[in-house]
Image (cartoon, grey):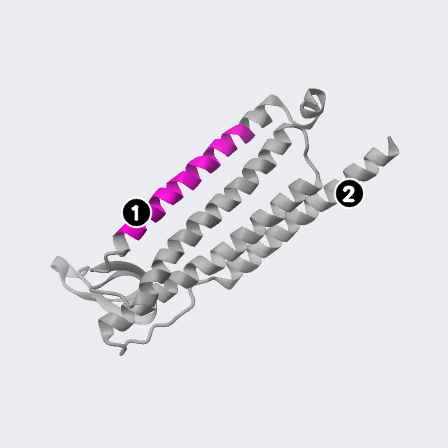
Amino acid sequence: MSQTRERVMSRSDAAAMALFMVAGVVIAVWTTVAAIARIIEVLPNRDVRVFAEFAGTTGEAPIGPNGAAATVELDTAWVIAPQLPGASLWALVLQQVVMAAAVWAVVACLLVLTWNMLRGRMFSRTNTRLVTAAGLTTFFGVAFVPFLGNMGANGAFAWISDRTFDNVIVAVEPFTLVLLAFVSALASLAFTVGDRLRRETEGLV
């Protein structure tokens, strides 16, 4: 097995992959801590800070001469709602849970994949499944997390404006989703072809 690993990657490659594994765990832990902090922040449901995206909305900012107000067009901002409807509050909580769970799932898949590679198993059905699972989890996470954030923001707008301000938009970028789908499919295809070539080569030996 050691000879196989040496043929597959050098020591520097192995060290880089080990560093990648450590970085993945750090990212997952940091995401979990941030998610817990955010949940603790919103659960009291008082003066809730909500990240919101705006569409064609203007406002005033003190950026004129001597701090005079000037008109600006809002793109994104944090709004503070005195209180949120129950559905919007739990959407923000679920957003953090989904985000942390998705990050841990992706990191776990990549950790096992990296470990398999370090042991010399570059292409296998297990690695193909791990790459596919990581790609699908990333895709649905990127789609679902902003959707839950939109629910929270819409609830904040409704509460602050007494349902007179309509700013319902979809924050998910279609280009990002298409790009993620393409990259995930390409990675899965590469590992599938690699596994097929490995099995065919083994059959010739």
Circle 1 residue: 37
User: Residue 56, which numbered label?
Assistant: none
Is residue 75 visible in the rendered image? The answer is no
Residue 109, image x, y percentages: 56, 42
Q: Is residue 139 left or right of residue 154?
A: right
Label 1 vs label 2: CA separation? 46 Å
Q: Is residue 34 magenta?
A: yes
Image label count? 2
Residue for badge 2:
196
Of labels 1 and 2, earlier in sequence is 1
User: Where in the figure is residue 205, as x and y percent of width and height?
Assistant: 86, 30
- Identified at 46% across, 62% down, the residue is 172
- Quarter in which the N terminus is drawn: top right
Q: Main secondary structure of the magenta part?
A: helix
**Does 198 lie within the magenta span?**
no
Q: Nearer the viewer, mark 1 or mark 2?
A: 1
Residue lying at 60% horizontally and 37% vertically, measured from the top left: 113
- SS at mark 2? helix
